[in-house]
Amino acid sequence: MIDRFENTNTTIHPLMFVLWLGMAGIVMLFGALTSAYIVRQSAGNWLEFQLPSLFQWSTLVIVISSVMLHLSYLGFRHRKLKQYRIGLLTSFLLGIIFLVLQYMAWMTLYSRGIQLTGNPSGSFVYVMTAIHALHLVSGLLAIAVAIFHAFRLPYEITQKRVDRFKLVLYYWHFLAGLWIYLYLFLNIM
Amino acid sequence: MAEIKEVTYNPETIIDELGYDDHFHEHEHGGDKYQVGFISKYIFSTDHKIIAKQYLITGIFWAIIAAGMSVIFRLQLGFPEENMAWLKPLLGKWIVVNNDGIGTLAPEFYYALVTIHGTILVFFVLTAGLSGTFSNFLIPLQIGARDMASPFLNMLSYWFFFLAGLVMFLSLFLSTGPFSGGWVAYPPLSALPQAMDGSGTGMDLWLMSLVFFVVSVLLGGINYITTVLNLRTVGMTMLRLPLTVWSFLVTAIIGLLSFPVLVAGFFLLIFDRTLGTSFYLSDIFIGGEALNHTGGSPVLYQHLFWFLGHPEVYIIILPAMGIVSEVMSTHARKPIFGYKAMIVSIASIGFLSFLVWAHHMFVSGLNPFISNFFILFTLIIAIPSAIKVFNWLTTLYQGDLHLRVPMLFAIGFVSFFISGGLTGLFLGNAPIDIQAHDTYFVVGHFHIVMGVAAFFGMWAGVYHWFPKMYGRFMSETMGKIHFWVTLISAYMVFWPMQYLGIAGVPRRYYSFDSFQTFSLFDDMNKLITVFAIIAFFAQLIFVFNFFYSIFYGRKVTSKNPWKATTLEWSTDIHPGHGNWAGKLPTVHRWPYDYNLDNVAFKPQYLPAAEGEEVVH
């Protein structure tokens, strides 16, 4: 897809740069949502409620998933095929568990009477977690492609594959970091 | 003053000797994979030059529609008593014909026209048509790159724009009409499907269209930034970039940081519309019945919208500024005055554009204390803007002015930017804005400073780079007629509006029949409408000139018809895929070496002579 012209005078791969810019855009999206949250909250008529404890578990899960993907990357770089493959699979699986936990957290919220259509304090939680989950799905797709590479392509460390793996890795770390931000934000606010 | 030596250069031999060999043409497997077949060459093309033309022609299409809409609603404002039945074949049921055969424009359609006119021009024409066209066309050519960082994403960017346009176009034919709550789409009109006819399906399509559009802008912008920062040729340092490229870079950064915020605002709006949340809605009665929504705030939407909305006006004007700087320096045969000051101004305008959004909301009940903050930063923006204007004027001063059509439009741009910018200083002050906000003063102000001025920048660019795009010139005569008629009629449309505004005539009104006070201004409204119609027909000259010249214009015979310094003029007259037939040019100097050391011009690929000190 990328025609990398060798006259570039920077060391960063253009696609990695594209990813950084994309992440900047996503940061702005969530920055806007959380600012809207603050603005709306300060206007009063704001329902206070306890966040489901499931969010703690999902935070733990996504962090472990992130670590697993990193171990997988290290395995790939150091020719540990088993670590490479198992790490990928585990992080993918944990990503799915994260989504399930988010869904269960929603159900808990719902059963406590915090509905999507009620006071905006609840709507914000649903909307922000849902938009984060959508981004996470895109991350899972990227990992799925990496899994396909890990099991179908002959194992070799080429610059191209390192670059590609890094793209997935950075994006996944970013999504984990984004969730930690949201989790802390929702808890502190 | 010493005699200026006229020079010609042969870029092929210089690039062949000093160029950078990236083995580009050796990569091609059995011919050029980008140039096979009509569909992959002209439709789903990944070549930035073709994509640029696609943006431009799509932009022209939308500009004609949006301008036509303005003529129709100006007819209503200028001649409300006249029979409009002749428009029935075009507008159908939106022209209501009474028993006497007299047709009038349906009020709800008037609002739809105004809304869609604004949406199309701001987003489709002056964002996609302007920065989409020229960022695509000029960035790779001027920085010495083979194409964009990701030609594929670049193609996707255009087709998302096309899709956005398609959805918007379909919405024009809905039986309930397109969205009609204003291009800013404030809730509650935008958030309640039952609020009025256009708020239903029309608004659904409007939102869908704009979400596609944002995807297009982000894909494009990410590509532009990456290309400028990663793919510059050897020697092309940041301080050797033409000001066009600087302006496209900052524009893309602004877009990347502000459009996601708009999307966040749209998401919440979509949830309010479809899932019954109450982000923007509270305590609303429709037809005496209380709605379920409580706890929302419509002002929240305004914050999110204007956090994009204000940077958006710089997304529109910065590319025009870059184009004007480039065109002006070339046709005045002088280095641009204050090159570094121009870059700093562009960057500081980009930075400040994020700190002023609430000056659009002084009448929304914003805390006057907070307003002061926004007033301060709004007025500070006048400083980099004034620096730029000063630099353009000093570039013209004592220049060897060649008043060709692109140069005329560049000068016209400065004229509009000054006169429209000054009224911005009025409106930036909350005490005056609160008086003038809902009057025609605002309409006059923003049309001059970001509507007409940006168009003039765009035309300067089209006339200047048309020879590079199509290998032919546009007609100078038609271009000059286009320029003078547009210049005069645009002023005659928007200056009177500012007068109307100071006199207190409110904007957004379908008709002033019920207000005796304003009948005083009937003649002025007629005058505005007449000039709006003249301006519209002047654009048809441009459209004809554009398409006629693609096929029958005077042929370009030399690579560098304007004797310009930038790299795009070192390519073949019809550059193929990869832009340079052989090696890539390397860069040895800044882009504005005009009439320095008594030499007419020195292109960027020209190495420094022995003992010569280059400017940058």
Image (cartoon, coloured by chain):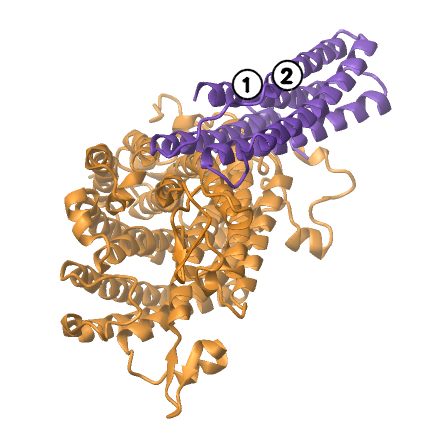
Instruction: Evaluate whether residue B475 shows in this view.
Output: no
- What residue did someone put label 2 on? A57
Which of the 4 image quarters holds residue B333?
top left
Residue located at (44% from left, 31% from top): A47
The N terminus of chain B: image quadrant:
top left
- Left or right relative to A87: residue B12: left
Could you say which chain is coloured orange in the image? B
Could you say which chain is coloured purple in the image? A
Label number found at residue A180: 1
Same chain under badges 1 and 2? The reply is yes
Which of the 4 image quarters holds residue A46?
top left
Residue A7 rendering spot, x and y as whole percentages? 58, 25
Between B69 and B533, the one lying in front of the other is B69
The secondary element bearing badge 1 is classed as: helix
Which of the 4 image quarters holds residue B32?
top right
Reply above or below: B458 against B240. Answer: below
Q: Nearer the viewer, mark 1 or mark 2?
A: 2
Residue B531 rendering spot, x and y as whole percentages? 27, 71
- Left or right relative to B302: residue B414: left
The C terminus of chain B: image quadrant:
top left
Residue located at (28% from left, 66% from top): B509
Q: Mark 1 lies on which chain?
A: A
The secondary element bearing badge 2 is classed as: helix
Q: Which chain carries label 2?
A: A
Residue located at (38% from left, 69% from top): B110
